[in-house]
Image (spheres, helix red, strand yellow):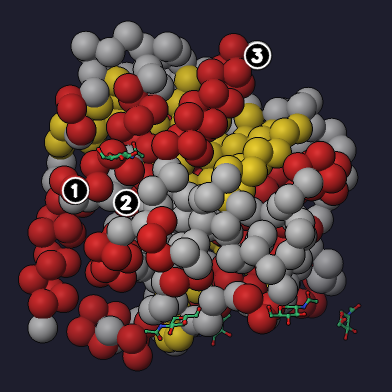
Amino acid sequence: MHLLFYALPVLLFHQSRNYVAAQSVCACSSVVIPVHVDVLVPKDPTDEFAGLKSNASELRRVDATYDIYGIFCEPATTVSSQNNDVVQLLVHGFTYTSQYWSPPVEEFRNHSYASFSCGHGFSSFAVDVLGAGLSSRPVNASDVQYPTSAAALSQVARYLKTTSLLPGVPAFNKVIGIGHSAGSGLLDFGTIVEGPQSPFDALILTASLGTKINTSTLPTFTSARDVDPLRWGSLDLGYVTVSNRSLFYPTDTSTFSPRMVLLDEFTMDVGTVGTFEQTGTIALTTGYFGPVAKVVGSEDQLFCTGTDRCEDVEALTAAERTLWPAAQSFKVVVEEGSGHDMNLDFFADGPFNTLVRFVKQFSAS
Ligand SMILES: *[C@@H]1O[C@H](CO)[C@@H](O)[C@H](O)[C@H]1NC(C)=O
Ligand SMILES: *[C@@H]1O[C@H](CO)[C@@H](O)[C@H](O)[C@H]1NC(C)=O
Ligand SMILES: *[C@@H]1O[C@H](CO)[C@@H](O)[C@H](O)[C@H]1NC(C)=O
Ligand SMILES: *[C@@H]1O[C@H](CO)[C@@H](O)[C@H](O)[C@H]1NC(C)=O
Ligand SMILES: *[C@@H]1O[C@H](CO)[C@@H](O)[C@H](O)[C@H]1NC(C)=O
């Protein structure tokens, strides 16, 4: 079985303490941040409102300390840094890891948003969300729900603003949250709960619209321990994965590399039933005051294709804006040709430039 043969170097790479990424524009290090969360979660993790509409008897408390793993990348000394006091907190989607922001093979180095943004002078911290990758994986999957995962991300953002991540790297003044798919959902949920107290100075939410997804176009998940008993055999049944990744790419198979899909399958990770079901909370209104941008691919099979939703950007912006009534500014960009995993197909350049443009704008404001 070639899976292990392939996966091992990838994991080793992931765990290496220090490496220099593409074209030496980036200096990157692994960092683990301890976070304390104390939240109420619904006793039923399939509650799509994640407990926000529940009464006290339907909730339980999760009070725990977790380790959140991430890769911090800063522009190499050869690149003029745009803004030493701004950091991007990059949050991957469901069943991915921080590697979504930096595919760990040479061939796909130019699909690394971490490197791309270093090249434009911006630092990033790409985390593994709670339960995924090298971050803590609570024994009981039902502890990993939107309230716990989102609180852990907010605590990471607060840490970045108060504590030196590494020797020579002072605390940052601004944290810009950039999410992909369920990662956007988690950032969104954090602002629903925290509103003006949110530690994020700006949000860029990719591959995530407030519109409820047509459930017939959702990917199907399976208990991770059934998918790969060797790797995940001991996990609680509530840890799940998505073995068929095709919905994450455009339907036109000439617009992405088949080897990217292979890499995707080999490096896929786990999520939980709760964090899958609770994505619907993004259809709730948020009292967040910072600037917000949404970026979605015209060929996103979860949100755009099969509907005319993404064709009229003005109408889409107006519809999405209603969920962010307090936002300082609100923009939607539809990337022509991009699929759900917009970093991974041949159009990645488009979204990468869009993200950096927003980051520049939000850093200056
Ligand atoms: C809480 O909500 C549940 C379901 O909606 C209901 O059955 C129960 O009576 C409620 N409990 C209280 C104390 O209001
Ligand atoms: C996980 O925790 C919940 C709430 O405490 C409990 O009802 C459930 O039985 C636990 N599941 C496992 C597998 O321990
Ligand atoms: C959901 O998608 C299916 C298949 O693409 C389609 O037949 C159905 O009409 C859609 N439902 C809604 C409510 O849009
Ligand atoms: C994966 O799902 C797509 C539809 O989304 C389907 O066409 C394809 O056959 C599936 N692949 C496998 C290997 O099951
Ligand atoms: C990656 O490199 C290829 C070939 O050099 C190029 O066609 C593609 O646009 C690049 N992609 C990105 C995201 O820069």
Instruction: Name the residue beneath numbered marker 3.
Output: 365
Which amino acid does the dot numbered 1 rest on? Glu
Pointer 3 or 2: first along the chain: 2
Q: Please tell me whether residue 35 is drawn above or below residue 115 in the rendered image.
A: below
Quadrant of the drawing holding the N terminus = bottom left
Q: Kindly check if marks 2 and 1 are in contact, taking CB atoms under 8 A apart as contact.
A: no
Instruction: Name the residue beneath numbered marker 2.
Output: 99
Q: Mark on residue 129?
A: none
Q: Residue at x 52, y 32 (%)?
A: 355
**Residue 82, percent from left and from top:** 42, 11
Q: Nearer the viewer, mark 3 or mark 1?
A: 1
Structural distance between the alpha carbons of marks 3 and 2:
30 Å
Structural distance between the alpha carbons of marks 2 and 1:
14 Å
Q: Secondary structure at mark 1?
A: helix
Which amino acid does the dot numbered 2 rest on? Gln
Q: Residue at x 58, y 43 (%)?
A: 335
Total number of numbered discs in the rendering? 3
From the viewer's perspective, tell me whether residue 63 is left or right of residue 112: right
Instruction: Name the residue beneath numbered marker 1.
Output: 107
From the viewer's perspective, tell me whether residue 26 is left or right of residue 313: left
Quarter location, residue 168: top left
